[in-house]
Amino acid sequence: MIIGVVIGESKPTEVTAQSSKPLSVGEYVIIDSQDGKILGLVERSAISSEALTDVRNFDEAIESKEVAEINSRDKNYKVKIGILGFLDKLQKGHVVIPAVPPLPGTSILEATSQDLGMIFGPTGTEWIRIGALLRNSSIEAKININKIVSRHLAILAMTGMGKSNLVSLIAKHVSALNGTLVIFDYHNDYESLDISKMNYMMAKINPRLLPSDKLAEVIELRENADKQQRVLRESLTESVRQSKEFWTSLEENVAAFGRTTKGYADSASRVLDKIDDAKHRFSDILDPDCGDPVDLIKEGRVNVLNIAELSERQANAGLAYYLQELLQQRKESVWERKGKSTKRTYKFLAPIFVIIEEAHVFIPKGEHTDTKYWASKVAREGRKFGIGLGVVSQRPRNIDPNVLSQMGSLAIMKIVQDDDQQQISSAAESLSKDLISQLSSLNIGDALFIGQWVNLPSIVHIDEVKGKRSGSDLDAVSEWSQTDKFKDIAKETTHGLVQKDLLLD
Ligand SMILES: Nc1ncnc2c1ncn2[C@@H]1O[C@H](COP(=O)(O)OP(=O)(O)OP(=O)(O)O)[C@@H](O)[C@H]1O
Ligand SMILES: [Mg+2]
């Protein structure tokens, strides 16, 4: 069915068309060109009325409104359509842009499921369903999971727009495929994920395995306390690391260093305080007897590591350790397969995908963190060794641009801030300005998918993962209304207790 006609000046990459009805931005259409069918994406859509243009006052507006209503030629629906390539080539996974622009007068046709199905919902086990096209809702939208493991992924959106929902959906599919996923869960969003192959655990840090500057971070020595740093460095000897009683041996060494080194008594006593404090405050996290924390991660599972209880510096040291170890183990696995190494100290035989929530905290712009160092290394080397990185953030402007630009695929949900949008457009060159400007009008669960995990940029409504508690907003008003009831119950209980106490007396 003809829904429009190409008008004005055409280019090989875009055409303007006059349409018979308003078209939605993000809708796919067919340009029936002289050289074959071309797939187009509506990037801008405008409606104007001749009668209602240049209206100078209210009375004139009312009159013009009546004229506009009876004149069927009054409305003007104009669209800008980006050219995505020849349809038959796209259906085979190739992008071929026409050398000659479509002629003015070319018909614009509605895209059918036959046209789009093979492009957005290819068959093959690596293609997993994520939702449906937002504007052509009968078309399934799938993503290629192989591409995110080999070329990484960024999920970016304002808070509450559905990032964790997408992560959960990916987790469900990875689990069904027996894949290995590691999620660093900073807000305890995934504990109740309803997946059979889930391995949920509290992240731990084994202080024996840390270099002294990292141990200094996790026990929260001040960064510029050079003398205290030295005390710790000198005291954390190999025999302390091997000792059965790690903390006691460390404390003995620190105390001895303070006694025997001139001018270090105060610093040593401060380090002792810090160790004592850390031992008590972080007893669940800092565990010298937990073995290698990486051993807790299981192959073929969705591993959710709860890092909610860790301070930012601890989480940073912990994440860096996990990334470093996972990369190393994958390297050894690949080397052995290539016959370059025979020792078998690794346990991950197949690729791993690692997801970091709140990536702007751990991979920040303009500041060094260990996690950033290892995340960049994974981003650069992961492809060769089968370790993929997924970064999730509500503040793209604060993520390190180098790491972001290495993410081969992106899911971008609603984003209104200009500087966030700019950061995204510089990370994703293929993104047109018009599409970027659409980001502010997306609703919860809608996302723009670009990069290697899709055949074409697409705007998708993501399926909602049911049966999990997620980061939904608290309903303060209804909780407040409950408080009175709780108070009454509390009063009754207290009253009862008082009565009972009196009786006991
Ligand atoms: N695809 C979807 N369809 C319908 N509702 C959704 C969808 N995705 C998310 N939601 C709803 O939005 C709420 C917030 O989603 P989610 O926790 O995934 O957002 P988020 O971007 O991770 O938020 P935060 O920035 O707080 O981590 C969810 O409780 C869910 O009800
Ligand atoms: Mg979230």
Image (cartoon, rainbow, N blue to C red):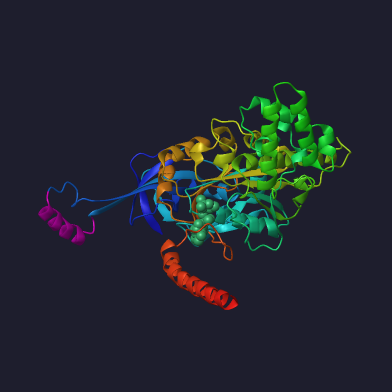
Question: Does residue 366 appear left or right of residue 218 in this picture?
Answer: left
Q: What segment is highlighted magenta in the picture?
A: 57-73
Give the mark count. 0
Q: Quadrant of residue 218?
A: top right
> Can the viewer see residue 405 in this picture?
yes
Tell me: residue 365, above or below residue 168. Answer: above
Residue at the extreme bottom: 503
* Residue 356 image position (x, y, % from top left): 61, 45
> Can the viewer see residue 102 in this picture?
no
Residue nearest the observer in this picture, 370 or 244: 244
Residue 262 among magenta residues:
no
Residue at the extreme top: 262
Residue nearest the observer in this picture, 446 or 229: 229
* Residue 45 image position (x, y, % from top left): 35, 49
* Residue 127 image position (x, y, % from top left): 64, 54
Q: Quadrant of residue 96?
A: top right
Residue nearest the observer in this picture, 366 or 276: 276
Residue nearest the observer in this picture, 270 or 387: 270
Residue at the extreme right: 342
**Is the C terminus in the top left, top right, bottom left or bottom right quadrant?**
bottom right
Residue at the extreme left: 59
Question: Does residue 15 appear left or right of residue 175 in this picture?
Answer: left
Residue lying at 20% horizontally and 61% vertically, measured from the top left: 69
Residue 65 among magenta residues:
yes
* Residue 33 image position (x, y, % from top left): 45, 47
**Is the N terminus in the top left, top right, bottom left or bottom right quadrant?**
bottom left
Question: Does residue 70 appear left or right of residue 27 in this picture?
Answer: left
The dominant secondary structure in magenta is helix
